[in-house]
């Protein structure tokens, strides 16, 4: 295996979502999850110019980064996802940019209520393959303070 281009990341990383001006959000790196998910509330699908869109509020009002901003995005997909408690639910998916470990990537997030979870973002295997990343579970926040480049 060629490890020269692999990046070592921790179990928790601080990430930026530049399209929405969110910085230093804690993301749990979860190799057990296939998809990445984003904590949202008031998730509402709608139609705009004949296309499917989604509007939502990100995070909870008690989160430091919450800004009461309603976000509207084109709906990327809608499919069933098995949650960590084993239940299957229909989720909406969006695509956005994520600033993560020296690069700016496109990421797909499922929108869901993660209020019962400690971290508002969960990064799953589908995204981690883009790195490629190696997860060091003994560390966290290895990706911060590095200049960003487009990937």
Image (spheres, grey):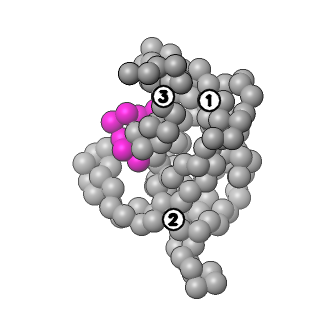
Question: Which residue is at the front of the view, 75 or 131?
Answer: 131
- Quadrant for the N terminus, please: top left
The residue to which callout 2 is attached is 76
Residue drawn 50% across and 24% down? Answer: 6
Viewer-nearest of discs 2 and 3: 3
Name which residue lies at 40% across and 39% down. 125
Pointer 1 residue: 101
Q: Are marks 2 and 3 in contact (CB under 8 Å)?
A: no
> Mark 1: which secondary structure?
loop
Query: Foreground residue, 58 or 12?
Result: 12
Q: Is residue 73 left or right of residue 79?
A: right
- Which of pointers 1 and 2 lies earlier in the amino acid sequence? 2
Magenta portion: prevailing SS class: loop
Gap between marks 1 and 3 measured at Cα: 10 Å
Q: Position of residue 146 (x, y in %)?
A: 71, 25
Q: Which stretch appears magenta?
A: 28-35
Question: How dense is the environment of label 1, judged by Cα within 10 Å: few (below 14), some, or many (20 and up)?
Answer: many
- Looking at marks 1 and 3 on the same chain, the residue that comes earlier in the sequence is marked by 1
At 67% from the left and 25% from the top, the residue drawn is: 144
- Residue 109: x percent and y percent? 50, 52
3D distance between C-alphas at marks 2 and 3: 25 Å
Q: What label does residue 133 carry, if any?
A: 3
Q: How far from the left and from the top, in percent, is residue 77? A: 45, 65
Residue in view at x 58 percent, y 85 percent: 50
State which quadrant residue 151 falls in: top right
Q: Is residue 64 visible?
A: no
């Amino acid at each position: 295996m060629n490890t020269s281009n692999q990046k070592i990341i921790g179990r928790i990383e601080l990430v930026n979502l530049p399209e929405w001006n969110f910085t230093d959000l804690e993301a749990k790196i979860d190799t057990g999850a296939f998809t990445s998910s984003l904590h949202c509330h008031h998730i509402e699908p709608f139609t705009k110019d004949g296309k499917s869109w989604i509007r939502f509020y990100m995070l909870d009002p008690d989160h430091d980064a919450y800004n009461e901003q309603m976000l509207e995005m084109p709906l990327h997909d809608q499919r069933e996802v098995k949650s960590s408690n084993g239940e299957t639910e229909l989720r909406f998916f969006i695509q956005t940019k994520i600033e993560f470990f020296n690069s700016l990537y496109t990421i797909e997030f499922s929108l869901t209520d993660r209020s019962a979870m400690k971290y508002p973002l969960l990064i799953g295997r589908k995204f981690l393959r883009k790195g490629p990343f190696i997860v060091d579970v003994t560390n966290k926040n290895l990706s911060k303070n590095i200049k960003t480049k487009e990937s």
